[in-house]
Each structure stands twice: as C-alpha cells, then as structure tokens.
Amino acid sequence: MKNSLRESRKIPSKRLSFLLTPIVATSVLAASPSQAATFSFAQAELTITGLTAESDFIDSLNEAEIDAISKNEDAPVEVINSPAVVNITNTPPEPIEIDTFATSEAFGENKDYLGTGNTNAKIVGNFDVAQGEEFAFNFEAFVDLETRIDDSSIESAQAEGEIGFWLFDTTGLSDKELEELSDNLLTADTNNSFIDQALEYFTLVGNLNTLGDGDTLTSKKSDKILVTFEDQVVDFDKEAENEFATAVVEGSLQRTFNKKSNLTLFATRRTLVKVAAPEPSTDLALLISGTLAAIAATYKRQKNHFTSRNRN
C-alpha cells in the first residue's frame, strides 16, 4: 500500500460540477540559480456519499489564500493553491454527494523569504429524519503531506492537512436558529470543543514541521463511526531533510432515531503550507502583514436550498 499512497498525488481525480472553485493563486518574486531550497506540500480530500436523508439546505464556504514575499531578488518564492473545490451534487432520486478537495504547495530558494498558502472549506447540511428512520452515509478521508529542506540551520518548512465532520442534534430549533447555527459553524474554529457537542464525529489531522518536534498524523472518531479501511505511511525523522505523511480512511455512519429528529452535519477540509529561510524577522513579518490584502486572496460562499422547508 505504501507505493500507492505516495504516488496518489500523480493521479488526477475526477470532479463533478464544481460549485465553488477559488482560482489558482500563484506568486513568483524572482528567478535565480538553484542553491538552498525549501518545499512544502499539503493535500486533503473528503468525500461523503450515500446520504440517506434529504437536505433542507446545504451552506458552503470555500477560501484560498497565499502570501509570498522576499527581501532578496536572488530568493524566489512561489506559492500555489489548486484547485480548492467544494462540489455538491443533488440529482434525485440519487442521494446527495459532497466532495471537497485542495492542494497547497510552497517553494523557496536561497534565504530571506517567506511563503505561506492555505485553503479552508466548510460545509453545513441540515436534514429531517423520521421516527425509526436510519440516517447513514459513507465517507473517504485522505491527507498527504511532505516537507523538504536543504539547510536545517536556516531553512524551515511546514505542512498541515485536516479533514473532519461532526453531526449535531438540532431538533426543535426554528428556521432562524438553524440559519444562525449555520453561520456560526462557518466562522468557528474546528477544535476539540466540537466533540463535546456532537452526536457523532470523525477527524483526520496531520502536521509536519522540519524544525523541531510536533510531527503528527492522527484520526479520532465516535463509537458509531465504522472504519472499513485505514492505511498510512509516515517518515517523522526530525533529523531528516525530507519528511512525509500520508493517510487514507474509509468508513460509514449509521444511526437510527427513536423520534422525529432534525440533524445538522458540519464538514471541513483544510490545508496549510509554509516555507521560510530563515524564520521571518520582525521587519519581514510586518511587511507581509501590511501587504496581505494586496498579494492574493479568494473567497466564495454559496448556499443551496434543495427542498422547501415546512415547520410548525
């Protein structure tokens, strides 16, 4: 399985009707002969299929952002986010399918530069479930990370990938309260506090940092999440100049409710890359902060009402 996991990035994935696709964002500051170099790569994908319930609404947020700056014309730095997609298909009587996918890459040469890129997708779906009806879906989560440097004394590279979903019982909330909850989820940080509030949850999180400790690749789930396949390949050698972490998890959720219920499903996909040589000085950090808006940013949000909502 090791070879298939590590080669996965070379295989193009088939995509359906892209609802939200931030543009490919690239910044190249210079060209120079190759010397010391850094590289960071992060890919994450979440696919949910076979949803057994109809959705009242699905609210989506998709962001992609880059920063790339150098104090030296001989220090090129490039950052790319592609394609940063949220794809939702609803073709009755077929069940709703959700797919979100993104790749972030950063590359730098020589020194006195900093490049960062990140993508962030959030999806909120609301579902009505009848008494005794089963709420179920299948999922596949995939994270692939790599960092590479040439000179550990001045260079650093970081890569992060995160996939997660949480199912909440929102029975009894009014339409207005459900809309407010959706808005709050789309602006919330995904942290452990979600686990305490969720009926069911699953997370797959990876982090690589070439300088120091902190390399991780972990998955967590609630009891009713059934994992049918899981595999990972990692190299966390903090003394090495090249590290990687790849994981794929396939599974399903099946849960029956003894009363008529309203459920809210919240799903996320996030990638982050960073390259620096050396870690940015105060002047460089301030310059980046001051030019953030001018470099590159994309933001899109789309709400889809699939069925009319009738509540007392």
Image: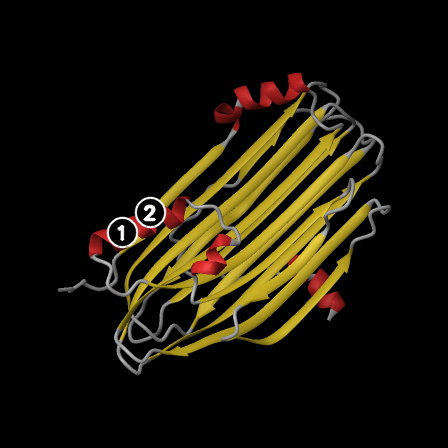
The answer to whether residue 10 is seen in the rendering is no
Find numbered disc 2 in the image and state the secondary structure of the residue it sits on: helix
Residue 239 is left or right of residue 161, and the answer is: right
Q: Residue furthest top?
A: 283
Q: Residue furthest front?
A: 196
Q: Amino acid at mark 2?
A: Asp
Q: Which mark is residue 50?
A: none
Nearer to me, 214 or 269: 214
Q: Residue furthest bottom?
A: 132
Residue 6 falls in image quadrant: bottom right
Classify 73 as above or below 89.
Answer: above
Query: The N terminus appears in which quarter of the rendering?
Result: bottom right
Residue 78 falls in image quadrant: top right
Residue ID at (82%, 47%): 238
Q: Position of residue 107 (x, y in %)?
A: 70, 37
Residue 205 is left or right of residue 312, and the answer is: right
Classify 4 as above or below 67.
Answer: below
Residue ID at (35%, 76%): 52
**Distance between mark 1 and mark 2 Cα atoms:** 6 Å
Nearer to me, 254 or 70: 254
Classify 34 as above or below 73.
Answer: below
Q: Amino acid at mark 1?
A: Glu
The answer to whether residue 165 is seen in the rendering is yes
Find numbered disc 1 in the image and state the secondary structure of the residue it sits on: helix
Residue ID at (57%, 35%): 26
Residue 281 is left or right of residue 176, and the answer is: right
Q: Position of residue 51 (x, y in %)?
A: 38, 72
User: Is label 1 in contact with label 2 (beta carbons under 8 Å)?
Assistant: yes
Name the residue tied to disc 1. Answer: 179
Name the residue tied to disc 2. Answer: 183
